[in-house]
Image (cartoon, rainbow, N blue to C red):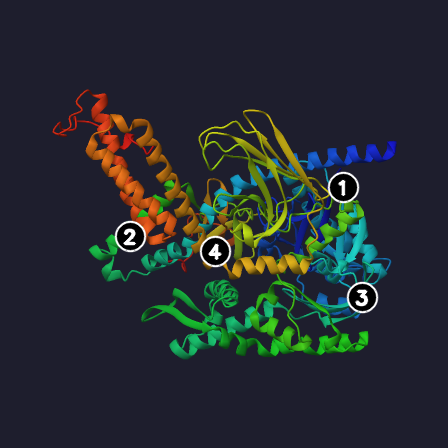
């Protein structure tokens, strides 16, 4: 089935995403960037068309043929006051079409706003096709909630011109809410979407009920955004430098270029750090020689510089709430959109305005495109229930020696899934094993939930560690767990079916996961002890076996050593004395090395009771392992 | 019943295709990711190269022959050699035709109507690594006269 592209067609930048195996993924453009500048240019000499980053890079050489911010003109008449305000800010020619619509002129040719938008969409379409290796013919495109029918139709037309069938036009705040799954809350809720982008601020109040999102009110400021924040930082740097060095960097275009980049970088760093250093050596020079710029900008200072910009978002928020007829505390969910919302002070303002923490986690630059991709998936039926794969909420496993839970299927594994592991017996001549099926996150069997147990018998008597018992876990798509155990030697098999592993409420699951975290240290210590015990038990068993089977061939001294240390270990084991076990285990391992040496000497025909034969040169001591 | 079965088969095929596509793309992305990891490291170091260049551009006249200044110049050479071995190359030379695929115009002089716009000055060099652009060269664009160097360029 062909992919449907979700596109956030922005004023400054555009982003595209697709749904893949039910998960949204943002696609990079041909230049390897997740953001595509919404800029189109034509080279007046060659008539070559440039779109995106490349168009932006040549903008100042070709200002009259480089079109940006076309979104401000979409679906508008030339006489619209918004058009009159915007056209003062653009260096390209804006004219009136015969039907009164806005036209822009590029390389002597007039284009409608949808035609320019189509060029951006076309680039995204072909970049997506190159990335995906398949044709893309359908899209879901987002628009601001305040767009009227004409503007929506213009956006749809742009898609059609670009060769895309626009399955739906979605409101940007709606898409952002979808990205956080707020359409499936199961109850009626009020959502506030706070969108502070590069150049515009939008606030939207939405009501969600029965999976339908409805925009109740919108407000904003079409000339407020992250770029204004950058400018404040630039101004501050210039002023500080002037105070310090008496030189006005505003007159120095090369210096300003460096300042612009440094200011944006500093602003971004201060979203995670409390302070950042601005170092711009050789920023300029005067008669006395080169001048360096070295400043420290703190988060507090940045907040002071931009506080009034942040405050300017308050009025629109309050107006939108008033228009929607609700009070701030009636807002159930808050969603942040736009890169500038990464600033902690902006998040704090939002928290103060609504009295609750905003949703985070999805990249605020991409959240709208992600939501568009999800909407596309819904329309194509890709997000059907039958395809919603579940995960195991808790780990599943069996009890093994020492009462330890051995996990076969870790928590959060997508089902259906299966896993097989081979186990063995713990005692000589053991003819049956008990398979105890467990669910939970604690290392000890007794602290997890027991789902069932069964016995596999008829195992042929053999020394411990020899029989091979294959245990298989299989969970089908309905969450039904099948556990089987099979003795490889006899082919004998037993199984148990555990109906839908649920029975646990979401709260219980959360509690079990929390318990496991809370007890992590204590559990680790206990698990170490059990491991030590198992190790000691194995060592003791092997020593005894060795004495029984090889005892006669060993030098008396070695045999006595092993017997003594083995007995000491047994005593520590019986007394359940951890530190005693550790020492005795080491001693026994040491004594066992003597067995190896003796055996080695024996194979070389030099076995002497007096042990006087030197080890032959080149002997590889490491070859002896505990047996 | 028949239809339902067909639906299920279709669904399965779709999922299978999705998975194969996903696998192919994630392999491709992994390779790109590795390249990008190296690129990110080099990109983070570029401002240091810029400043070292600036320092060397500003060596006072009476110190140009000084061993200390020469040693610093050798250090720069060593740094650029090391980068070259990693596949890093400088982008942007005065005189070449302006190409926004690798140049970012930060200044522009009105070019004479018939002349091809060219790089008249590199404000900050660009770099590419194994053919991928790390950073475009910031350039001044105008009509380039090969004999008439711009005097404001040290």
Circle 3 is placed at which residue position? Answer: A188
Labels 1 and 3 share a subunit: yes
Labels 1 and 4 share a subunit: yes
Of label 1 and label 4, which has the lower sequence position? 1
Query: Chain under label 1?
Result: A
Q: Residue furthest top?
A: A605
Say which of A417 and B11 sits in front: A417
Residue A451, compared with residue A301, is above or below; it is above
Task: Please tell me in which quadrant of the rendered image residue A611 appears.
Answer: top left
Q: Is residue B66 left or right of residue A296?
A: left
Say which of A8 and A544 sits in front: A544
Q: Is residue B87 left or right of residue A563?
A: right
The disc at residue A523 is 4
Of label 1 and label 3, which has the lower sequence position? 1
Q: CA distance from mark 2 to mark 4?
A: 60 Å
Task: Locate residue A27, reporting x and y percent.
Answer: 64, 47
Label 1 or label 4, whichever lies nearer to me, is 4
Task: Locate residue A525, reporting x and y percent.
Answer: 43, 55
């Amino acid at each position: 089935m062909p992919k449907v592209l979700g596109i956030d067609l922005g004023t400054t930048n555009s982003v595209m995403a697709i749904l893949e195996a039910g998960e949204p993924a943002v696609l990079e453009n041909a230049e390897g960037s997740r953001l595509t500048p919404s800029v189109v240019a034509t080279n007046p000499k060659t008539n070559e068309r440039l779109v995106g980053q490349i168009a932006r890079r040549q903008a100042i050489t070709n200002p009259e043929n480089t079109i940006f911010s076309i979104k401000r003109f979409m679906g508008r008449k030339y006489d619209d006051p918004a058009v009159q305000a915007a056209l003062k800010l653009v260096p390209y020619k804006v004219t009136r079409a015969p039907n009164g619509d806005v036209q822009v002129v590029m390389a002597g040719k007039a284009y409608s706003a949808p035609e320019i938008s189509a060029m951006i969409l076309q680039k995204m379409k072909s970049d997506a096709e190159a990335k995906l290796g398949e044709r893309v013919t359908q899209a879901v495109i987002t628009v601001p909630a305040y767009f009227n029918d004409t503007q929506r139709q213009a956006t749809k037309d742009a898609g059609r011109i670009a060769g895309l069938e626009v399955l739906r036009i979605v409101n940007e705040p709606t898409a952002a809410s979808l990205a956080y799954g707020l359409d499936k809350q199961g109850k009626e809720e009020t959502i506030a979407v706070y969108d502070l982008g590069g150049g515009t601020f939008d606030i939207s109040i939405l009501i969600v009920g029965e999976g339908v999102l409805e925009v109740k009110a919108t407000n904003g400021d079409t000339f407020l955004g992250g770029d204004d924040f950058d400018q404040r930082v630039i101004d501050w740097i210039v002023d500080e430098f002037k105070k310090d060095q008496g030189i006005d960097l505003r007159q120095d275009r090369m210096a300003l270029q460096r300042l612009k980049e440094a200011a944006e970088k500093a602003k971004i760093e201060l979203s995670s750090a409390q302070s950042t250093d601005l170092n711009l050596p050789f920023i300029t020079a005067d008669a006395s020689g080169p001048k360096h710029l070295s400043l420290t900008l703190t988060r507090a200072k940045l907040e002071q510089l931009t506080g009034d910009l942040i405050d300017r978002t308050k009025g629109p928020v309050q107006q939108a709430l008033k228009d929607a007829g609700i009070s701030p505390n009636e807002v159930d969910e808050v969603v942040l959109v736009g890169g500038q919302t990464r600033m902690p002070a902006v998040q704090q303002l939002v928290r103060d305005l609504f009295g609750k923490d905003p949703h985070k986690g999805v990249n605020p630059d991409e959240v709208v495109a992600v939501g568009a991709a999800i909407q596309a998936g819904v329309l194509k039926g890709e997000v059907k229930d039958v395809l919603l794969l579940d995960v195991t909420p808790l780990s599943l496993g069996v009890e093994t020696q020492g009462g330890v839970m051995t996990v076969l299927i870790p928590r959060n594994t997508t089902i259906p899934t299966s896993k097989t592991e081979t186990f063995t017996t713990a005692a000589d001549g053991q003819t049956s094993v008990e398979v105890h099926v467990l669910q939970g996150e604690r290392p000890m069997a007794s602290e997890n939930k027991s789902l069932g147990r069964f016995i596999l018998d008829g195992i042929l008597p053999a020394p411990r560690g020899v029989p091979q018992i294959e245990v298989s876990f299989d969970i089908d798509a309905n969450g039904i767990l099948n556990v089987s155990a099979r003795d490889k030697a006899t082919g004998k098999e037993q199984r148990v079916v555990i109906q839908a592993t649920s029975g646990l409420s979401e709260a219980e699951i959360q509690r079990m996961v929390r318990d496991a975290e809370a007890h992590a240290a204590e559990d680790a210590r206990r698990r170490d002890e059990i491991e030590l015990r198992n190790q000691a038990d194995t060592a003791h068993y092997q020593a005894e076996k060795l004495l029984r089977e090889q005892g006669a061939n060993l030098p008396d001294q070695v045999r006595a050593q092993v017997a003594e240390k083995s007995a000491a270990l047994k005593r520590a084991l019986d007394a359940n004395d951890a530190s005693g076990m550790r020492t005795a285990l080491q001693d026994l391992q040491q004594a066992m090395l003597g067995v190896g040496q003796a055996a080695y000497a024996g194979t070389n025909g030099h076995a002497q009771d007096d042990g006087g034969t030197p080890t032959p040169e080149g002997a590889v001591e490491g070859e002896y392992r505990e047996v | 019943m028949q239809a339902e079965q067909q639906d299920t088969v279709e669904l399965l095929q779709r999922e299978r295709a999705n998975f194969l596509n996903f696998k192919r793309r994630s392999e491709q992305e992994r390779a790109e990711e590795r390249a990008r990891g190296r690129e990110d490291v080099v990109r983070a170091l570029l401002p240091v190269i810029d400043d070292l260049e600036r320092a060397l551009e500003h060596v006072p006249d009476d110190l140009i022959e000084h061993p200390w200044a020469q040693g610093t110049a050798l250090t720069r050479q060593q740094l650029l050699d090391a980068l070259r071995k990693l596949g890093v190359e400088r982008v942007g030379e005065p005189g070449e035709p302006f190409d926004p695929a690798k140049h970012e115009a930060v200044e522009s002089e009105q070019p004479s109507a018939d002349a091809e716009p060219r790089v008249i000055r590199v404000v900050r060099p660009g770099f590419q690594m194994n053919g991928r652009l790390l950073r475009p060269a910031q350039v001044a664009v105008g009509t380039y006269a090969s004999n008439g160097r711009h005097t404001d360029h040290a």
